[in-house]
Amino acid sequence: MTASLSDIDRLANSYFHQRLALNPEEATSVGAPDADPGTWSDYSPEGCAAYTALAQETLTKLGTLKEQSPADSVTAAALKERLELDVELAHAGETVGVINVIESPLQTIRDTFDMMPRATAQDWDAIARRLASVHHAFAGYQQSLRARLQGGPVIPARQVEQCIQQAERVADPGTSPLSALAEQAASFSLDSGVVVGTATVEAQHAFGEFAQFLRTEIAAHTTSTDAVGRERYARFSRLFLGSTIDLDETYQWGLDELAKIDAAQRRIAQQLYGDGVSVREALDRLNADPQYTIHGLDSLRTWMAQTASQALEAMNGAYFDIPAPMQRIDTNVVANGTGGIYYTAPTQGFTRPGAMWWSVPAGSEDFHVWQERTTVFHEGVPGHHLQLGLAVYLDDELNDWRRMGSWMSGHGEGWALYAEQLMAELGFHTDPASMMGVLDSMRLRAARVVVDLGVHLGKDAGTWGDGAWDHDSAWTFLRHNVAMDPAFLSFELDRYLGWPGQAPSYKIGQRMWNDMRNDARHRAEARGQDFDLKAWHMKALSLGSLGLDVLRQALEEDDETADHNPTAPKVA
C-alpha cells in the first residue's frame, strides 16, 4: 500500500504478516516472503494456539485505535468480525485437529507444492526441503488429532475414511501428484532432480504413514454421525458468510429456488427436444452429443484457456475495467485428482498470475462443455479472477490484509455465482444447451443449500428418506437433482458433510450480492440517476473480500456520501 498508512492499516498489516510467519503455506499461496518456503506450519495444538493468541492480541490493540477515514471504518469492522469469530471457534475446539476431504492440513500439505515457484535452484531447494519435512508437518497434525479425540468435537468417520484414501493416493508413486516433481526438477538440473527425487520418496512415505495413523489410531474412535447440529452450524455459517442468517428461512428458500430452477430446466428440455422430454433425459442427450463433448486433458486445458480469454476480452471496458496485469489467466489440469475445480489468486506484483485449476479424478477423459462453460466464468472472468486479482492489484488503495488475507467464502463464491448469472443476463448463453448448463450449475448450488442445512440441522428429509436427512437420503436427492458424474458428485457430498456451512455460502452469497445490487439501483433511482452497472461492479470489488454485512454497510455508506456523478476506481 503506497498511500499513507493509518494506525488501523498498520495493525491489519502487522496481523497479516505475523499470520503468514506462522503459516508458510499461506505465505507461499500469496507469494509473500514472511516465512521460509521450505518449511511448514506447526499443526500441533501449540501451533493452533499461537493463531488464537495472535487474534486476541490484535483484537485488544484494535480496541485502542481511532478510525481516521471511511476506509479505516471498513477495515476495523471487517477485522473485528473475523478475529472475534476466530477466537470463538478456537474456544469451541473447532481449530484443533480439523479433518475433512477438502480443507484440512492433509490437503494443504498435498496441494501447496502446486503453487511453489520452480524457476531457480533456490526454488527447487525449497521444494526439496519441504518434501523432506512432510513427516514433521504430519507429526504436529497427529498431536492435534489425538487432542481432538480427547477433548472434542467429535471426528466423523466418513471424513477419516476418505482422507485415508487421499493420503494413500499421494503415497502411491503411480497415483501421487508429487511423482512429477522429480522429473521436472531433473529438467532444470541433474543435481536438483536427484535431491528432489529422494525427497519425494520421503514425502510419499510420510503420506503412507499418515494414512496408517488414521486407520489404526483415529478411525476406531470416530462417530458415524455426519451432522454437527444447530449450535456448531451457526458458527460455521457466520464463518463463511460474515453474516448471521435465519437458518430455517434459508432452508425453505433453498427448496423454493430448486423448484423454480427445475421449472426453467423443464422449459429448456422441451425447447431442445420437444414435449414429453424430462430434464434428466435432456441432460443425458446433451452428454451423449459429440458437439458438446471434448476428449482428453490437453483438450480440456485448451478449451478452458480459450473460453477464459474470450470472456476477458468481452468484459473489459464494457462491464469492468481490467488492469493490464490481470489480462492473463493460466489454466491447469491436474490428473488423478479429487474432482475439485478452483482458482488461485496472483501473487503480489503478479509474478505468478491468477490460475484456474481442474483436479480431474483418475479415468475421467470426457468433458461436457454445455455444462462447464459457466464454470469457466465462475473461476475466471468475471468471477474469481476479477475479484481476487483486482484486490491484489490495488496495492495503493487497500492494506495487505484486505488485499490478500481476508478471503470470505460468501463474498467470493457468492460473487462467482453472481458472475455466472451476469453472463447469462448479458446474453453469453444463447445456445439453449449452454443455458441448460447455467441452470444445472444453479440447481447444484440450490441443492447444496437444502442438503447442507438439512443434514446438519437434522431437518426432515420428506420423500427423500426415512426421517432426518443423512448421507443416504442426501445422495438420493443429489443424484436426482444434479447432473454430475458420480465420481465428482460423491466427492461433493463428502465435502458438504465434512465442511458445514461452506457449500451453501455460494448461493446465499449470490442472494446477498443481488440484494446489494438491487438496493444500489433503487438508491440511484431515488436520486434521479441511471444505475451505472460497471461503476457499481468496480466500487464493490475495490473494497476487497469482506464479510457480507460489512460489505453491505460499506456500499450503503459510500452511496450516502457520494456525489451525483460517481466514477469507478482508476485501475486501468
Image (tube, rainbow, N blue to C red):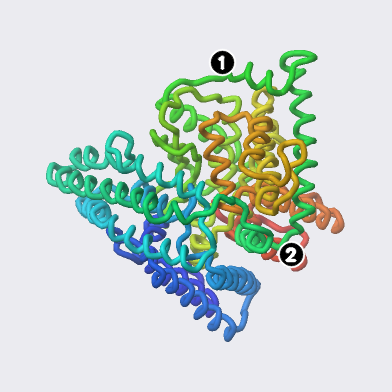
Amino acid marked by disc 2: Ala
Question: Measuring 32% from the left and 39% from the top, which residue is drawn there?
Answer: 176
Q: Nearer the viewer, residue 221 or 85?
A: 221
Q: Quarter-wise, where is residue 49 in the image?
A: bottom left
Answer with left or right where residue 201 lies relative to residue 485: left
Question: Measuring 47% from the left and 32% from the top, which residue is drawn there?
Answer: 305
Q: Which residue is mark 1?
A: 291
Question: Measuring 48% from the left and 67% from the top, which residue is drawn there?
Answer: 1
Answer with left or right where residue 70 lies relative to residue 379: right
Answer with left or right where residue 47 lies relative to residue 438: left
Q: Give the number of marks.
A: 2
Indicate the secondary structure of the residue bearing disc 2.
loop
Please, is residue 276 above or below residue 329 in the view?
A: above
Amino acid marked by disc 1: Gln
Of tags 2 and 1, which is closer to the observer? 1
Indicate the secondary structure of the residue bearing disc 1.
helix
Answer with left or right where residue 187 lies relative to residue 217: left
Q: Where is residue 43? Give x, y as percent.
A: 38, 64
* Residue 144 can be seen, yes or no: yes
Please, is residue 321 above or below residue 475 in the view?
A: below
- Indicate which disc, 2 or 1, sits on the residue closer to the N terminus: 1
* Residue 381 can be seen, yes or no: no
Q: Residue furthest bottom?
A: 64
The tag on residue 562 is 2
The tag on residue 403 is none
Q: Where is residue 404? Give x, y as percent.
A: 49, 60
Q: Quarter-wise, where is residue 464 in the image?
A: top right
Q: CA distance from mark 2 to mark 1?
A: 50 Å
Please, is residue 296 above or below residue 571 in the view?
A: above
Q: Where is residue 39? Give x, y as percent.
A: 29, 61
Q: Residue furthest front?
A: 220
Q: Where is residue 16? Give x, y as percent.
A: 46, 69
